[in-house]
Amino acid sequence: EKGGYAHFTLKEIYEQPKALRDTMTSRIVPGQPIKLDDIHITREMLLHYSRIYIVACGTAYNAGLIGKVAMENLSRIPVEVDVASEFRYRNPLIDNRTLVITISQSGETADTLAVLRDAQTKGARVIAITNVVGSSISREADDVFYTWAGPEIGVASTKAYLTMLVALYAIGIHFAELLDTKTAEELDAIKKELLTLPEKVAEILAHVEKVKDFAQRIHGEKDVFFLGRGLDYQIAVEASLKLKELSYIHSEAYAGGELKHGSIALIEDGISVIAPITQRDLTEKMQSNIKEVVSRGAKVMAVTYAENEDVAKYADEVIYIPSTLDLIAPILAVVPLQLLAYYVALYKGLDVDKPRNLAKSVTVE
Ligand code: M6R
């Protein structure tokens, strides 16, 4: 049932083009408004909401980090993101002018479900983004966006994460259409680019030699750092989680601009730094961050867009991803980093599909 792949995790990484296509088909069509059959939110309702909270755990939370940026950008509604187990206990400001978006692959995560129930009790409306039809979260939410990633067996979430991102963009575009915050041309351009993702992800998956080489180089290390700015920071956070849970290597993600505020103290000779660089307006700033760590002896692997030739002058290893809009590029940048985590775990001989101490669905609080 692994379809010829050594692990479910690898199979699921390779299923991402299909998962993306299935999640977008019939919902995202250029020249037409976004079609979300199970979301019944009107322009009047949206005008009434003062804010959106995105609440989730783990990788679903990491998807929410990107969702916040994408959604604020598209709809201009303020969005806050929080970890469900924190949100619950901090007496959040929820009333009937709050829209809550919960994200959960399984639809059964206890803390996320508790947030959904609490929010509804306080009068908020809840949209659920989930991958499991009939799950508790899907049944109790007011509106649902099903990601069509198919069953995810590997404990580390990969294809579900990518489809969650697409779901958040689709909802963001839908809200932008309802609120007229972007022109039809702008939104059409984004829709068209989203629809190119399956083939671009497939292209990345067809060229993995460099990723494997880098995995080979770092698999014996104790600490690895991820560095990013803007949306690349949120991608770095997810890439770091993936590496941690699959390979047991300690890793941390830092915002490039925060380096000087403390974390640069940890950069020493021979340490590996992994840097997604997809945001064109932040490329120069990231390159100076890279120079800073390289001058302290770091080995750098950058993941960047095809036209960014300069980066090869500073980084030891560069993985190029196909070009797309900056808003969408992080969806591509994470793919080589998922593979990196997979191959590091493989070279270490670990149980990739079932990392120690972890469960696929966390139904205890
Ligand atoms: O089923 P959910 O999306 O609610 O699960 C949330 C987290 O438990 C999950 O994303 C976890 O962090 C994964 N192991 C990440 O790969």
Image (spheres, rainbow, N blue to C red):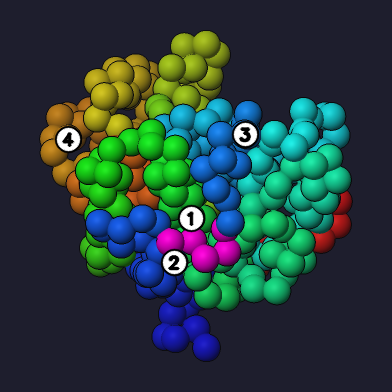
Q: Which residue is mark 1?
A: 167
Q: Are marks 3 and 2 in contact (CB under 8 Å)?
A: no
From mark 4 to mark 1, how far is it between C-alphas? 29 Å
What's the amino acid at mark 3? Answer: His
Residue 303 in view, yes or no: no
From mark 1 to mark 2, how far is it between C-alphas? 8 Å
Q: Earlier in the sequence, mark 2 or mark 4?
A: 2
Residue occupying image coordinates x 52% and y 36%: 68
Q: Is residue 38 magenta?
A: yes
From mark 3 to mark 2, how far is it between C-alphas? 29 Å
Q: Which residue is mark 3?
A: 48
Q: What stretch of residues is rendered in magenta?
A: 35-39
What's the amino acid at mark 1? Answer: Ala
Vertical side of 288 occupied by 231: above or below: below
Helix, strand or loop status at disc 2? helix
Q: Position of residue 246 (x, y in %)?
A: 57, 57
Q: Are marks 3 and 4 in contact (CB under 8 Å)?
A: no
Q: Which residue is mark 4?
A: 308
Q: Position of residue 90 (x, y in %)?
A: 82, 29
Q: Position of residue 21 (x, y in %)?
A: 36, 69
Main SS, magenta region, reads loop
Give the number of the mark in front: 2 or 4.
2
